[in-house]
Amino acid sequence: METLQPIPNFSESDLEAILLSKEQIDERIDSLANEISNSYAGKDLTVVCVLSGALVFTADLIRKLDVPTRLDCIRADSYADATESSKPPRIASSLKTDIAGKNVLVVDDILDTGKTLSAIISHLEEFEPSSLKTCVLLDKKERRQVDIEADFSGFDIPNAFVVGYGLDFAEHYRHLPCIGALKAEFQILP
Ligand code: IMP
Ligand code: MG
């Protein structure tokens, strides 16, 4: 007998549960932006957005900052098209601006094993910024394999594969305004 394959809608209906609503995210970003603005008061800031996952978070965060802010982007390839990383992350595209002597804040969507953020930090340290800090929206502490903590962190979350608000599965779901655990039946590549 033929088994029916579930068909994803690439919408909130593919989520097992909503973990963080749009309102919860907005509220937390307000307080994160305050923390960051206080910490860089009187200084210039260069935000480095880790593409593509941190794009939505960075866009919301920088509009709430109260310090002069430059923006640059970096891209690291870790999870090709799957939920588990295999090879170590590679810097696929580096900065456009010179960060020597600058106060740099790396913004990423999620700290999972820690491999991506630590590879990015090692890469950026070569350009000799005057300070280098990190900010992540989500932290899956249970999954850590590298000894790294973010300087600014939005939410600790349990070990589930989550999508939405910039986070993807095979480039889908980034546009969802909330964050939720993707149903297991949709964590299958075509
Ligand atoms: P790490 O190198 O294992 O810390 O993974 C960090 C990167 O993996 C993040 O920037 C995300 O792109 C991706 N990632 C880790 N966990 C998730 C998840 O639950 N959903 C979507 N992407 C994830
Ligand atoms: Mg990412």
Image (cartoon, grey):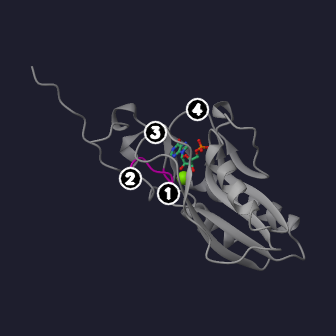
- Alpha carbon separation for disc pair 4 and 2: 20 Å
Earlier-in-chain disc, 3 versus 1: 3
Tag 3: residue type?
Thr
Tag 1: residue type?
Pro
Magenta segment boundaries in residue numbering: 164-171
Residue, disc 4: 159
Q: Are marks 4 and 3 in contact (CB under 8 Å)?
A: no
Residue 160 visible somewhere in the drawing: yes
Whether 126 is drawn above or below 101: the answer is above
Farthest top residue in view = 1
Earlier-in-chain disc, 4 versus 3: 3
Answer few, some or many: residues within 10 Å of disc 2's Cα (few below 14, many 20 plus, some between 14 and 19).
some
Answer few, some or many: residues within 10 Å of disc 3's Cα (few below 14, many 20 plus, some between 14 and 19).
some
Q: Position of residue 142 (x, y in %)?
A: 66, 30
Q: Residue at x 79, y 61 (%)?
A: 132
Tag 4: residue type?
Asn
Closer to viewer: mark 3 or mark 1:
3
Earlier-in-chain disc, 4 versus 2: 4
Q: Which element is circle 3 on? A: loop
**Which residue is at the front of the view, 7 or 78?**
78
- Alpha carbon separation for disc pair 4 and 1: 21 Å
Residue, disc 3: 83
Q: Are marks 1 and 2 in contact (CB under 8 Å)?
A: no
